[in-house]
Image: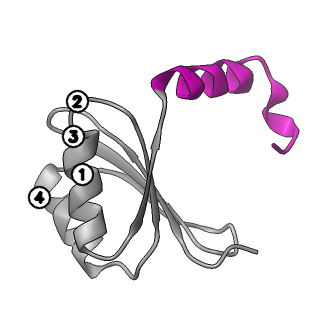
């Protein structure tokens, strides 16, 4: 069992995809939001682990998340792509 919630962010220019999972593994939130809504979400959420793919704006969102008390993890884009291929080939039925 994890100690805190996990917030996964898929960064883009105008619309960001946010997925929030509880410490028990239950899906709390999965929706597309604007950058302003994401700021509000990060400000109002309890301290969580925030994970995002490394990109041009990941350091900005990482610093903002840390300022709200979250723990930030930036994932190498090559590792994210490998994970996506792993999921596409039907191995998603096996837990990682």
Q: Position of residue 2 (x, y in %)?
A: 69, 73
Query: Which residue lies under the disc numbered 1?
Result: 61
Query: Which residue lies under the disc numbered 4?
Result: 36
For the stretch drawn in magenta, what is the main secondary structure?
A: helix
Give the structural element (helix, strand or loop) at label 4: helix
Residue 48 placement, left or right of 86: left
Highlighted magenta segment, given as a residue range: 77-96
Q: CA distance from mark 3 to mark 2?
A: 15 Å
Which is nearer the eye, 55 or 36? 55
Going from N to C along the chain, the mark reached first, 2 or 1, is 2
Q: CA distance from mark 2 to mark 1?
A: 10 Å
Q: Is residue 62 inside the magenta stretch? A: no
Crowd band around label 3 with a 10 angstrom C-alpha radius: few (<14), some (14–19), many (20+): some
Q: CA distance from mark 1 to mark 4?
A: 12 Å
Give the structural element (helix, strand or loop) at label 2: loop
Residue sitting at x 58%, y 26%: 79
């Amino acid at each position: 069992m994890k100690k805190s919630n996990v917030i996964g962010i898929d960064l883009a220019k105008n619309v960001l995809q946010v997925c929030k999972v509880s410490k028990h593994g239950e899906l709390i939130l999965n929706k597309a939001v604007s950058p302003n809504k994401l700021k509000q979400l990060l400000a109002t959420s309890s301290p969580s682990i925030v994970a995002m793919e490394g990109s041009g704006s990941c350091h900005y969102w990482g610093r903002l998340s840390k300022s709200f008390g979250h723990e930030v993890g930036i994932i190498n884009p090559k590792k994210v792509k490998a994970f996506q291929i792993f999921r596409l080939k039907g191995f998603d039925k096996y837990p990682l």
